[in-house]
Image (spheres, helix red, strand yellow):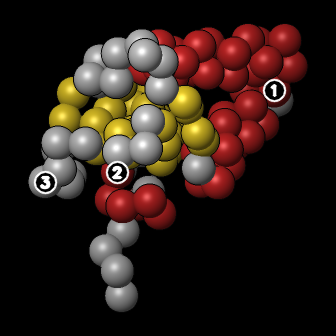
Amino acid sequence: MELKIIFSRLALHDLKEIYNYISKDSVKYAHREIQLIRSAANKLKSNSLLGRKFEKLDDELTRELIFKNYRIIYSISVNEQIVVLSIHHHSRLIAYNPAFKPEE
């Protein structure tokens, strides 16, 4: 059974930032990179455990799929959907990612 993929607001913002950064050099390649990232995330529909456990959280249902230089961080929910929480470039510190900052 295929699960539904949902991109969180933050993940959509991440995609927009990736697009904007790459499009400074090439709109064509920016569009292509976004397509490839979405395609990688869509592989989770048929195998939600494809990614490894996300080390920052003690939770088996929060995982990350490594794709090129990106960490596609997602959560598997009980209602047959996968929520992409963030698309994080490996060169950035995960501590600065707003999706994983401690509650204040």
In the figure, residue 37 lies in which quadrant? top right
Q: Give the residue displayed 44% in from the left and 36% down from the top.
A: 80
Identify the mark nearer the N-term, 2 or 1: 1
- Amino acid type, callout 1: Ser
Give the secondary structure at mark 3. loop
Give the side of residue 104 with respect to residue 61, left or right: right
Q: Position of residue 23 (x, y in %)?
A: 81, 26
Q: Secondary structure at mark 1?
A: helix
Residue 64 placement (x, y as % from top left): 32, 33
- Looking at the rendered image, the disc whose residue lies closer to the viewer, 3 or 1, is 3
Residue 39 falls left or right of residue 72? right
Task: Give above or below for 11 relative to 31.
Answer: below
Q: Which of pointers 3 and 1 lies earlier in the amino acid sequence?
A: 1
Q: Mark 2: which amino acid?
A: Ile
Disc 2 is placed on an element classified as helix
Dot 1 crowding, Cα within 10 Å, few <14, some 14–19, many 20+: some
Which residue sits at x=13%, y=54%?
Answer: 58
Residues at discs 2 and 1 in contact (Cβ within 8 Å): no
Mark 2 Cα-neighbour bin, 10 Å: few <14, some 14–19, many ≥20:
some
Tell me the residue that label 1 is attached to: 23
Circle 2 sits on which residue? 94
Q: CA distance from mark 3 to mark 2?
A: 16 Å
Q: State yes or no: discs 3 and 2 in contact (Cβ < 8 Å).
A: no
Instruction: Please tell me which residue lies in front, 17 or 59.
Output: 59
